[in-house]
C-alpha cells in the first residue's frame, strides 16, 4: 500500500490522491505495507498566481499565469527573471524609479506555464 505525506503527516493512501494546495507543497509517496514493486519520487506542486504585482517586498519566484506588474521604487539585483503568460509591465515614475544595477541581469519572458 502507498502512503502519501506532505512532509508533516500522512495525507492519504492508495496509488493516487487528490489535493488542493494553496502554497508550494511537496508530496512524497512511500510503501506502508508490502508488496512494494516500484521506486517513489517526491512530487513538487508549484502554485503560480493568475496575476502578480511586484514591489520592493516581493520575493521570487516572479511568475504569473497572465500578467506581472512591477511598481517603483524597485531595485532588480543579480540574475532576475520575470515570467508571465501575457504581459510584463514595469511602472516607474519620478521619485519611484526601477533600477537595474550594472552587473545585474534582468530577463523578461512571455511564455506559458510548464
Image (cartoon, rainbow, N blue to C red):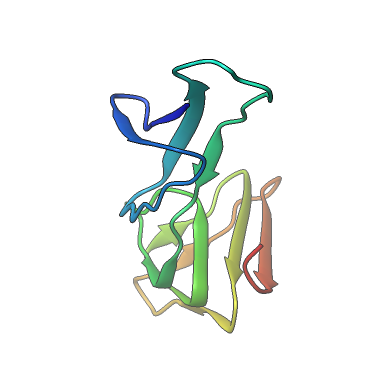
Q: Position of residue 79 (x, y in %)?
A: 65, 46
Q: Nearer the viewer, residue 20 or 64?
A: 20
Judged left or right of residue 26, residue 102 is right
Q: Is residue 53 above or below residue 47?
A: below
Q: Nearer the viewer, residue 20 or 57?
A: 20
Whether residue 72 is visible = no
Q: Residue furthest front?
A: 35
Q: Nearer the viewer, residue 67 or 9?
A: 9
Q: Quadrant of the C terminus?
A: bottom right
Say how many tags the image has. Answer: 0
Q: Is residue 41 above or below residue 107?
A: above
Q: Position of residue 76 (x, y in %)?
A: 53, 54
Q: Position of residue 82 (x, y in %)?
A: 58, 63
Tell me which residue sits at (71%, 45%) in the image.
103
Whether residue 76 is visible = yes
Tell me which residue sits at (48%, 66%) in the image.
98
Q: Residue furthest bottom?
A: 86
Q: Quadrant of residue 74?
A: bottom left
Q: Is residue 4 above or below residue 58?
A: above
Judged left or right of residue 90, residue 41 is right
Q: Position of residue 32 (x, y in %)?
A: 44, 18
Q: Nearer the viewer, residue 72 or 5?
A: 5
Amino acid at each position: 500500500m502507498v502512503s502519501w505525506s506532505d512532509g508533516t503527516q500522512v495525507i492519504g493512501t492508495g496509488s493516487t490522491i487528490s489535493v488542493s494546495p494553496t502554497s508550494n507543497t511537496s508530496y512524497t509517496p512511500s510503501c506502508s505495507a508490502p508488496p512494494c514493486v516500484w521506486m517513489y519520487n517526491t512530487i513538487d506542486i508549484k502554485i503560480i498566481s493568475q496575476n502578480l504585482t511586484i514591489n520592493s517586498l516581493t520575493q521570487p519566484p516572479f511568475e504569473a499565469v497572465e500578467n506581472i506588474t512591477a511598481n517603483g521604487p524597485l531595485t532588480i539585483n543579480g540574475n532576475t527573471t520575470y515570467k508571465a503568460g501575457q504581459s510584463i509591465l514595469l511602472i516607474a515614475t519620478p521619485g519611484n524609479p526601477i533600477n537595474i544595477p550594472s552587473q545585474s541581469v534582468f530577463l523578461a519572458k512571455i511564455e506559458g506555464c510548464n
